[in-house]
Amino acid sequence: MVKPFIIGTRNSGEFLHAGAKILKEGGTALDAVEAATRLVELNPNDTSVGLAGIPNILGVQEMDATIMCGKTRNSGAVGALKGFKHPISVARKVLDDAPHVLLVGAGAERFAKAMECEEGDLETELSRKVYKAFIDDAFDDEGVIDESQKWVVKYAKSQNLKKWYEKLADEHHGTVNIMAMDADGNIASAVSTSGTALKFPGRLGDSPIIGAGNYCDNRYGAAACTGMGELAIRNSTARTLIHYMENGLNPEEAAILSMKDIHDLSAVGGMNCIVMDNKGNTTSATTNPDRESVHWYYDVDMTEPEKRIGINVNP
Ligand code: GLY
């Protein structure tokens, strides 16, 4: 019998307390991952998830999130969601109450309002400052940005947009991944992000796409991604990781192979993953040879999360 536990990426170690508390009280993995993700979404110092998230190219914050239940493989996802404090809880409502898996934009907002999800302004002084810094850094030609922001159209038409985004490739995104197993052996996984900095309006990354940025299945485990979402979409990275485990690889072997799949694309940008199996083994990996791959582990007998170092997968 595996001890209930929760794991998360990046700076989420301290936020795992909320999920661990739920697991210690006999709660579900789904509730645990949602609770921990909500805390990350509320962190005003984290400019890539929820409050203070980096805006799109027009200065508008558009949030993506998914939550998945490994027992039923029921899933809820929202994309390009504006004006709600907890994208992960809107995704949870989709999982619990909608006849659909993925809602985006105005439809997602209509649904969230109908479900009485908490509305809120996610913009902060910090997010405005970071946006301005990105814009200042991204454009050498100040004349490009005109008052009406019609320059976005100009860039798209002139086909410079793709090249321009390559400049932003690796550092300009962040995402939180959290997954857990409860006392019944059920697994759940959650992902939330404001997406790539200065993304084109309406752009969805891997985070709201089940199978790309998030997947779990009680029979095998869970996997989720951070990094340049387009790469995880192209490889269905989260589902593929589970597929590798289904075919007998352990989490480390699966993580290494999936990061090699990303290298095989020979594309600009990096990818990172976090993986657990249903025996309680966990790992994380990155395509970046220089960045430390970190995840945090917290089981019900612990009082603090434990930092675990993952694998660098070189090209
Ligand atoms: N992985 C987050 C994104 O690309 O939006």
Image (spheres, rainbow, N blue to C red):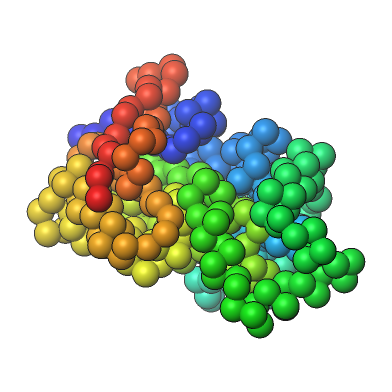
Q: Taking 34 as reference, is 248 left or right? A: left
Q: Quadrant of residue 297?
A: top left
Outermost residue, bottom side: 157
Q: Nearer the viewer, residue 58 or 187?
A: 58
Coordinates of residue 193 in the picture (x, y in percent) = 57, 52
Outermost residue, front side: 141
Outermost residue, right side: 147
Judge whether 62 appears above or below 181 on screen: below
Coordinates of residue 14 in the picture (x, y in percent) = 52, 26
Q: Taking 275 as reference, is 253 left or right? A: left
Q: Nearer the viewer, residue 45 or 7?
A: 45
Judge whether 12 appears above or below 253 on screen: above
Outermost residue, left side: 248
At 63% across and 37% down in the image, what residue appears?
46
Can residue 80 be seen by looking at this rendering?
Answer: yes
For the N terminus, the image quarter is top left
Coordinates of residue 15 in the picture (x, y in percent) = 54, 31
At 44% across and 18% down in the image, what residue appears?
304
At 82% across and 39% down in the image, what residue appears?
125
Can residue 115 be seen by looking at this rendering?
Answer: no
At 18% across and 58% down in the image, what residue appears?
244
Q: Nearer the viewer, residue 78 or 313?
A: 313
Q: Taking 165 as reference, is 152 left or right? A: right
Report the number of discs.
Answer: 0
Coordinates of residue 148 in the picture (x, y in percent) = 87, 71
Q: Taking 200 as reference, is 261 left or right? A: left
